[in-house]
Image: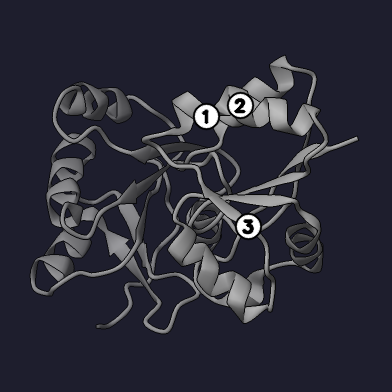
């Protein structure tokens, strides 16, 4: 019986893919990719030659039913995003839901996820956390920040390098400048950086430099008493 397999891909270092993920990609009839150009880099690295189809934010609403029907007709399909686990701030949820509605078997492989890697590396409490993904850019942002001020536990965000300083500034106001925090940038890549401190110290640090790459921002709970050693630039 054909299945949909959700395949996490490396968030940077191509060696972080699992043997099972490689086998799944080799055996798939077709690979759904968020950006076929980026996925091609991974496939070429491991000498995998399979047809690909674009599956991204702008077309997933229109294609999920057709894809589910193709699996029911006997095609094994693998779903990948540009990096990490599909469905986590990436396309994937709609397709998984449609397949389950149509009694299509869905298999999800374990693998790299940027926010989990960053959370553990931060040194902040991992026993209770809230993953927010990207904060609203404009509408609803102030309301969300007010809500987060009342939240207990560690907070986890994805952020653009172009908005990092603004977000650190707003979080400092909403949560307090002395809240422990960590910015994890370009995880597993050549220029990986994990900067720990407070919201205020991180704001000072990143205001003075050009920021590039993919970012995970971790903010510790207000009652966290353990000390965080700030890393030197």
Q: In the image, is residue 201 above or below residue 41? A: above
What residue is shown with label 3? Answer: 51
Real-space Cα separation, disc 2 to disc 3, in angstroms: 17 Å
Q: Closest to the observer: 141 or 68?
A: 68
Does the residue at mark 2 contact the one at mark 3 (Cβ under 8 Å)?
no
Residue in the image at 58% along x and 54% along y: 52
SS class of the residue under badge 2?
helix
Residue in the image at 24% along x and 32% along y: 136
Task: Return the x and y of residue 217 as percentages of the image width and height.
Answer: 35, 53
Q: Which mark is residue 75?
A: none
Q: Earlier in the sequence, mark 2 or mark 3?
A: 3
Task: Return the x and y of residue 173 as percentages of the image width and height.
Answer: 13, 40
Q: Which mark is residue 66?
A: 2
What residue is shown with label 1? Answer: 63
Q: In the image, is residue 183 above or below residue 89? A: below
Real-space Cα separation, disc 1 to disc 3, in angstroms: 17 Å
Other-residue count near label 1 (Cα within 10 Å), few / some / many at <14 / 14–19 / ≥20: some
Does the residue at mark 2 contact the one at mark 1 (Cβ under 8 Å)?
yes
Rendering quarter of residue 180: bottom left
SS class of the residue under badge 1?
helix
SS class of the residue under badge 3?
loop
Q: Closest to the observer: 67 or 158?
A: 67
Residue in the image at 49% along x and 53% along y: 115
Colour pattern of the rendering? one colour
Report whether residue 61 is seen.
yes
Task: Return the x and y of residue 104 as percentages of the image width and height.
Answer: 78, 26
Does the residue at mark 1 contact the one at mark 3 (Cβ under 8 Å)?
no
């Amino acid at each position: 019986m054909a299945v949909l397999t959700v395949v996490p891909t490396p968030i940077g270092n191509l060696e972080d893919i699992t043997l099972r993920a490689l086998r799944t990609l080799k055996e798939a009839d077709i690979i759904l990719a968020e950006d076929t150009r980026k996925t091609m880099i991974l496939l070429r690295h491991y000498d995998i030659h399979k047809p690909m189809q674009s599956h991204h934010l702008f077309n997933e609403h229109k294609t999920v039913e057709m894809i589910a029907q193709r699996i029911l007709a006997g095609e094994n399909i693998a779903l990948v995003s540009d990096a990490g686990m599909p469905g986590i701030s990436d396309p994937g949820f709609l397709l998984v839901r449609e397949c389950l509605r149509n009694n299509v078997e869905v298999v999800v492989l374990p693998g790299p996820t940027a926010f989990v890697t960053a959370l553990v590396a931060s040194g902040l409490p991992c026993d209770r956390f809230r993953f927010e993904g990207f904060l609203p850019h404009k509408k609803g942002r102030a309301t969300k920040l007010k809500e987060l001020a009342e939240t207990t536990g560690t907070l986890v965000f994805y952020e653009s390098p172009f908005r990092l300083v603004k977000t650190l500034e707003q979080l400092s106001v909403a949560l307090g400048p002395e809240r422990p925090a960590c910015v994890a940038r370009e995880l597993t890549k050549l220029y990986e950086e994990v900067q720990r401190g407070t919201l205020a110290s991180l704001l000072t640090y990143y205001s003075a430099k050009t920021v590039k790459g993919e970012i995970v921002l971790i903010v510790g709970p207000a009652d966290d008493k353990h000390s965080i050693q700030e890393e030197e630039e």
